[in-house]
Amino acid sequence: MSPRAQWSALVTGLCFFSHPMSGHLRCSAAAAGRSTMWELTVLLFLDLILGHLTLILFFTLLPPIPSPPATPEKPILSLHPPWTTIFKGEKVTLRCDGYHPLLLELRPISTLWYLGHLLLPSYKKSIEVHTPGVYRCQTRGAPVSDPIHLSVSNDWLILQVPYAAVFEGEPLVMRCRGWYDKIVYKLHYYHDGQPVRYFHSSANYTVPQARASDSGRYQCSGTMRIPVESAPMFSAKVAVTVQELFQAPALRVIGRVEARGGAFGGVVLRCETRLHPQKRDTPLQFAFYKYSRPVRRYDWDAEYTVPEPEVEELESYWCEAATATRSVRKRSPWLQLPGRGSPLDLASTTAPDPGNQPLSFRKPPVSRSVPSVPSVPNVTSAGPQFPAGGAPTAGPPACAPPTPLQQTAGALKPDVALLLREMQLLQGLLSRVVLELKETQSLPGHTVETPTSHSAVSQGTPETTTVES
């Protein structure tokens, strides 16, 4: 076969492969000699380019496929009704809310359920359960949810508490329930063994705004008519923990603002705190105080600028963070600002937390003690005399100022002597009163002449203090 015939066969095959319908006609025409070889080659390349352009246009016009989140969050497992303890024979509903991807499978599995480490044979979004244990759920591509512990009781009386975490400032509700909703009379609620509330008949116990101090072990007791009134019965103790909504704030110096034009500069303070991960969307407001005087009322801004004219030596500030309803309020420790012209220390330490102590409008006392002159022993012109033994012993240099502890001890010596003298006087007076009482009791109805003076001698001291009546 000649090279021309081979080339014709190759082009004909490519023509059928690239475009079967049109290629058949074109190749037939080539075989009949009605078209040249170069025309077939050009048509072949045009068909290939047209096919590529069609594919590109098709994928460009497709709607975008939603991509799953980079790090899916935990699904939220909820309980209905919201009580972690039920009676034997009752059922509750568990619901798993979270990220559910679009699965292109014949039998998509959207939710997995676990009882302990056992995989349950259910893939629905919610299930009904009556078996005690620890339940968890998981959605495709997400971590396992937080657990819910379900308890099943066979007692006459149970104390039901909410399954979800209770945070500071939120209401804490619990109820004492009789066997299959029988009425409970003479109902008492206990917190850590101490009675906190009494009801004549069945009623829920509610703490309107829970605090960390409300955490502990709760219990209830009461009587039921089955058919006559029974003796007092007690429920099992249930542990309740009130979660911290946000940490106690800390006031920090973050920088200075330079004076520009007619405006004063200042020091920028920030009130920093951290919300619980489950409550990170809770809005907080901040207030700033100088000693006990508010310098800025509650606002959403966590920063405050202290004007430069107010930046004096040892000015103390503190801040307070609170929710919008003021149900939870927490204050920071004191922060002392450096004086005007002093270097700004961004890692300055804070004073102790004022806590619940009453605040004073006076500035904290400033220590301005004058170093006392140390006593110098008598020396001769030959120089200082050292004790027998040769060389002087090691110790602080003679010119070193006394330490604060030594200054405090020196300042307290006169006060201690005065206090001892007053105690000696008081001892003499008490001794005289005791002697008069003894003499009066020994001679009833007899008048005892009171001595005009009495001397009280303190043991171990050479002085004698006379107390005149």
Image: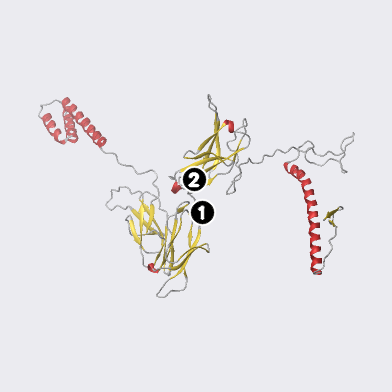
| Local SS, label 1 | helix
Numbered disc in front, either 2 or 1: 2
- Relative placement, left or right, of 211 versus 180 is right
Q: For label 2, count other residues whose C-alpha is less than 10 Å away and answer few (under 14), some (14-19) or many (20+).
A: many
- Relative placement, left or right, of 69 versus 416 is left
Residue 51 in percent (x, y) is at 21, 33
Residue 126 in percent (x, y) is at 33, 56
Outermost residue toward the bottom in this view? 228
Residue 96 in percent (x, y) is at 36, 54
Residue at 60% in and 35% down: 345
| Local SS, label 2 | strand
Q: Which badge, 2 or 1, comes first in the chain's sequence?
A: 1
Residue that carries the numbered disc 2 in the rendered image: 322
Which amino acid type is marked by label 2?
A: Ala
Quarter of the image that includes the C terminus: bottom right
Which amino acid type is marked by label 1?
A: Ala
- Toward the viewer: 248 or 121? 248
- Relative placement, left or right, of 226 versus 270 is left
Q: Which mark is residue 212?
A: 1
Is residue 247 at least partly visible in the picture? no
Above or below for 443 versus 49: below
Above or below for 126 versus 71: below
- Relative placement, left or right, of 372 versus 181 is right
